[in-house]
Image (tube, rainbow, N blue to C red):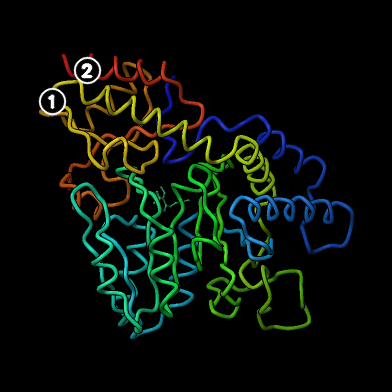
């Protein structure tokens, strides 16, 4: 089986992730921060260690600024719905995922002003347009670090520098970049970094989180889920301190244990090496695709900043047919269609049909790519 769907979720997970999850359930199954007994303390320790690993990965000095959620979508909803008020102005781009656009479109009906900056057909962002629109009234700038449709990497450092000169919050959707592109929350002037735990960080499904930048106070965001935290139980009001303010209810202990092991794998391999490996494979893949007549590849050129996500269409064939036949006849697993990002497909001209998306992971090899290209050629021929 050839797995080229790492942008949806990475697979297979490292053995260390599986071991950490089983280990949590066997040896540390208590409810963290609730009961004071040894199993509760053991669970709390594993969760704190995962916070520390994530803080190290994103160069965050205080691990308590790492908040666990269930996925990047939950983190984006927390930031978007927990901050914006009627009258606020938000700038975003036309390559955002629906995890950004759906909460924004909901709030738009409540009087929040959304400006979507149209990206170029290769999905790159015109920074002068961002600069022109960014003003003292802008409350939030939300940018997709790496597109889940074209693999383009947007210049977060430059954008962060621009946004830092204003009062706006800088929110970076790192669902596709966490673990595959180096991120330094402080240096990049990121106020809120939202990430998936189950993609490049190699954790299990149901994990994700949010990192608060150094100028953010817990009270800048209203929690959208309130309840028991195991702390300040004498009060019926939500605590204001981190991370409890945003972590009501029992956490996904086994998931967070697995995430911690996944992040340790990433730290060991080094994100810059993972990035170099995946982009070199993307180059091989794109060259191979471009040599097949009738294939159109979308997004940035291979030498431009990009991840291992590659989207293409085949002249005269439906993407659904390609996806189905790759799976059925060749056991090549990928994703086809709109990838929950209709605006991105409007931007690159592939709406409403979408594209075939092949997403490389750190265990993909040149041999795997050659096999997938061979399968595609066979499908195109008949
Ligand atoms: C760019 C982008 N943002 C947000 C998400 C949502 O991530 P999650 O599935 O962890 O909620 C995804 C998922 O594919 C994504 O690619």
Mark 2 or 1, closer to the camera: 1
The quadrant the C terminus occupies is: top left
Residue at 42%, 22% in the rendered image: 2
Residue at 38%, 34% in the rendered image: 359
Q: CA distance from mark 2 to mark 1?
A: 12 Å
User: Picture coordinates of residue 292 (x, y %)?
Assistant: 19, 20
Mark 2 Cα shell of 10 Å, populated few (<14), some (14-19), many (≥20): some
Mark 1 CB lies closer than 8 A to ligand 1: no
User: Picture coordinates of residue 337 (x, y %)?
Assistant: 26, 41
Residue at 79%, 53% in the rendered image: 45
1 relative to 235, above or below: above
User: Quarter of the image holding residue 130?
Assistant: bottom left
Q: Disc 2 vs disc 1: Cβ atoms closer than 8 Å?
A: no
User: Picture coordinates of residue 284 (x, y %)?
Assistant: 34, 24
Give SS at disc 2.
Answer: helix
25 relative to 195, above or below: above
Q: Residue furthest left?
A: 316
User: Picture coordinates of residue 260 (x, y %)?
Assistant: 67, 45
Mark 1 Cα shell of 10 Å, populated few (<14), some (14-19), many (≥20): few
Q: Residue furthest right?
A: 37
As drawn, the label of residue 84 is none
Mark 2 CB lies closer than 8 A to ligand 1: no
In the displayed structure image, the side of residue 331 where residue 186 appears, left or right: right
Give SS at disc 1.
Answer: loop
In the displayed structure image, the side of residue 372 where residue 221 appears, left or right: right
Q: Earlier in the sequence, mark 2 or mark 1?
A: 1
The residue labelled by disc 1 is 294
254 relative to 142, above or below: above
Residue at 27%, 25% in the rendered image: 287
The residue labelled by disc 2 is 379
Q: Nearer the viewer, residue 375 or 274?
A: 274
């Amino acid at each position: 089986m050839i797995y080229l769907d790492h942008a949806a979720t990475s697979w297979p997970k490292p053995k260390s992730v599986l071991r950490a999850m089983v280990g949590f359930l066997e040896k540390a199954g208590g409810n963290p921060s609730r009961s004071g007994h040894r199993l509760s303390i053991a669970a709390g320790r594993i969760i704190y260690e995962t916070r520390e690993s994530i803080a190290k990965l994103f160069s965050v000095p205080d691990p308590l600024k790492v908040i666990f959620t269930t996925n990047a979508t939950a983190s984006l909803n927390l930031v978007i719905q927990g901050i914006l008020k009627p009258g606020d102005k938000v700038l975003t781009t036309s390559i955002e995922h629906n995890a950004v656009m759906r909460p924004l479109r909901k709030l738009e009906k409540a009087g929040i002003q959304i400006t979507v900056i149209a990206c170029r057909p290769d999905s790159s962002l015109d920074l002068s347009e961002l600069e022109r629109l960014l003003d003292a009234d802008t409350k939030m700038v939300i940018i997709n670090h790496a597109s889940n449709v074209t693999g383009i990497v947007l210049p977060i450092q430059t954008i962060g520098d621009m946004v830092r000169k204003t009062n706006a919050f800088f929110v970076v959707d790192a669902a596709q970049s966490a673990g595959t592109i180096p991120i330094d929350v402080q240096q990049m002037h990121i106020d809120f970094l939202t990430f998936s735990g189950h993609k490049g960080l190699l954790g299990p499904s149901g994990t994700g989180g949010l990192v608060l930048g150094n100028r953010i106070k817990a009270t800048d965001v209203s929690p959208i889920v309130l309840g028991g935290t195991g702390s300040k139980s004498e009060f019926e009001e939500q605590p204001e301190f981190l991370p409890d303010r945003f972590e009501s209810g029992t956490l996904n202990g086994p998931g967070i244990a697995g995430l911690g092991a996944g992040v340790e794998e990433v730290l060991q391999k080094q994100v810059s090496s993972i990035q170099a490996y995946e982009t070199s494979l993307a180059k091989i893949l794109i060259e191979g695709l471009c040599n097949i007549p009738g294939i159109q590849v979308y997004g940035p050129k291979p030498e431009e900043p990009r991840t291992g996500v590659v989207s293409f269409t085949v002249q005269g064939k439906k993407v659904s047919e390609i996806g189905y036949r790759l799976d059925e006849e060749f056991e090549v697993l990928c994703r086809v269609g709109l990838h929950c990002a209709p605006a991105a497909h409007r931007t690159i001209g592939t709406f409403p049909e979408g594209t075939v998306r092949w997403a490389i992971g750190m265990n993909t090899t040149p041999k795997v790519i050659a096999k997938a290209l061979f399968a595609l050629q066979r499908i195109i021929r008949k």
